[in-house]
Every structure is written in C-alpha cells, then in structure tokens.
Image (spheres, coloured by chain):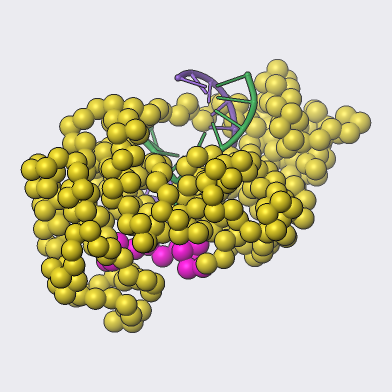
Chain colours: A yellow, B purple, C green
Amino acid sequence: MPGTKGYHPLQDLFPATPLTSTFFVPLPLILSVSGSETTSVDEHARLVRAFEAALREEGPGVEACARFRQVICHYFRHHARQMPWRETDDPYRIFVSEVMLQQTQVERVRKKYPEFIERFSDFAALAAAEQREVLEAWQGLGYNRRALALRQAAQTIVRDFGGKVPDDPAVLERLPGIGKATAASVAAFVHNRPTVFIETNVRRLFIHFFFRGREEVRDAEILPLVAMTLDPAHPREFYWAVMDYGTMLKKRYPNPNRRSASYTRQAPFEGSDRQVRGRMLKALLEHGTLSTEGLLAKGGVDEKRGTRVLKKLLAEGFVAEEEGEYRVP
DNA sequence: TTCCTGGCGG
DNA sequence: CCGCCAGGAA
C-alpha cells in the first residue's frame, strides 16, 4: 500500500526487539492497514493481555510500562490520525496548534487552523497583526482570551527570542497563555524533547490502564508512570499515540477521567456570563464600533449583567472605549 | 484552591 | 447532554 515506507511488519519487529528499546518509526506513518484488520485487532488484544499480566505480576513498574508502550505504539501504527500540525516541522505552526488545542476539540481546530495559518504565516506576521484581526480569525474556537495571549506570545518570541520557540519548559511557561501542560507539550511537539506532562488524554489513558477500579486518582500518581512509559527517543510520536489512543478510548468507555481527583464539571453555558461575553465581543467584531446601548441590545442582555461583562472585557483588553463608543483595538 | 472563560462536535 | 491536547486571576 502507498505511504507505508518505513513500516516493518509487527511480526518481524516485536519478537526481535527488547522491551527497553523504542518502537516508533519515523514518518510517514501507517494510517490504515487494509486487509489485515483482524490480525491487527488480535495483535492488539495480545499486547493488552501481556500488559495486564505484567501489571498483575509485578505491579506498575518498568515491565508494565514497557508493555503499555507497546500497546499504544501498536495502535498508533494502525490508527494514527492525520493532522496538518503533525505534518510540519515549522515551530510556529506547531505552537499555534498547541494553543488552539487547549480546551478545544481536534475537529473544531481542524476547520479553523488552515485559514489562521494562511492569514498569519509566521510569528512576525502574527506579532504585527491587529488584535481585531486575530480575534476575527479566532471566532468559532472559543476562549477568546487565548487569541490575545497567542498574539502577545508571538510578540515576545519575536522580540526576546529572535523568532525562535524556546525549548526549555520553564522559559515557555513565562509566555502568556502557556501554562505547565502547554509548555511541556510545546517542548515535546516542537523540539521533540522528552518532557513528562499530563493533560486530559494522558490522564484518561493511564487511569484506564493502571488504575482499574480506583477513584480519586491523583496526577502525582500518574506522572511517574508517564515518565517510565515515555519513549525518550521519540517523545513526539509517543504523545501523538497517547492522544490518539485516548480519543479512541473515550468513545468506547465511560470517561475514565471522572475517576481523577482533578475532575470537575463545567458550569452550564446557557444563560451564563460567558455566553453573553461571547455575544458582545462577536457583535463588536461585526459592527466595528457600538454604543453601550447597541452593545447591550446585540448581546441580548439586561443592563446590570451587560455592564458587568463589559467592564471585564475592558479590563482584559478585549475592548477599548472612546467617547462613549466601544471597539476592538 | 476556587472560580471564570466559548462554542460546538459527537 | 458531555466535555474538549487549561491558564490566569482572585
């Protein structure tokens, strides 16, 4: 089949490779294996059983982690998702994808990402863009604050780092909009650094495999297992595999993340301040400038709530006021 | 630590 | 309806 260069039949690879070795191959990856699905499913089941046996006999140690790595690697070989930000080495494109993917599902990012990259083709272009332009391109992704932070991060990267994305998570964390998880994932996906981090897919996957029957699993319990499982020679592919397996798992089981100590439900969106906030900003982007009255009308909101939300939008720099008229700077 | 933040795919 | 490759302010 086409696009399978670099692929070695699993039968050849697994028995011959010691557990401590790495299993990932360079791109291009296997996206599907036609005609061998049954073999693939059987092999996957066999690998899961080997993992479970190791976990039963020796607990969550090096052996179980190595077996677990084989499970997700095997899955990834056969079911890797194709994404634009996985097919580039451009640090800018990967950085933008990481910010977009915070709290936003892949399918939604897929649709917005190409246009954004076309409109702002590198850090310099994004840094030089008007805030308004960036927010317009961001509409539909949600969490508009991230768009402002991304633009500011681009400015810092251009001004302080010569347009290069830092590879030290501690340095990345000082960029606006980049917290612990995103700093580590940027280091992993942009620079292929073997950072250890936890986000929702990592959490789901490790809770599902290593904490069966447990409740209130803490991230601190998961972290050492990630460190032991991570393929230090191929961090990027390792985390891609984790993301893809985690997404698949979600469709087949009740969300294991509900057994995480850090699991919380979001407040309802309908009728909330943030719904109003989104509407008001959107109205302002569509109309250019609006008066207080116009803004309240477009947001479909009473004066009390509208004024409160507007005050926060002003404080956060989304909106500027000039002689009673509001606009996006 | 807790609360707030968007919009929509599945 | 659930929850998304969380960050920052309070």
The percent coordinates of residue A65 (x first, y second) are 22, 49
Q: Above or below — where is A276 with respect to A72?
A: above
Residue A169 point in image, percent of width and height: 52, 46
Residue that appears at 34% across and 39% down: A223
How far across and down, in percent of the image, does residue A105 sit?
A: 46, 48
Q: Quadrant of residue A33?
A: bottom left
What is the count of numbered marks?
A: 0
Whether residue A103 appears in magenta in the rendering, the answer is: no
On-image quarter of the C terminus of chain A: top right
Give the side of residue A304 with respect to residue A191, left or right: right
Vertical order, C4 against A261 (above or below): below
Q: Is residue A85 magenta?
A: yes
Q: Which region of the structure is painted magenta?
A: A75-88
Residue sitting at 41 percent across and 65 percent down? A82
Q: Nearer the viewer, residue A146 or A324?
A: A146
A184 vs A18: above or below: above
Residue in the image at 18% along x and 36% along y: A212
User: Which quarter of the rendering shows the N terminus of chain A?
Assistant: bottom left
- For the point 14% across and 63% down, the residue is A43
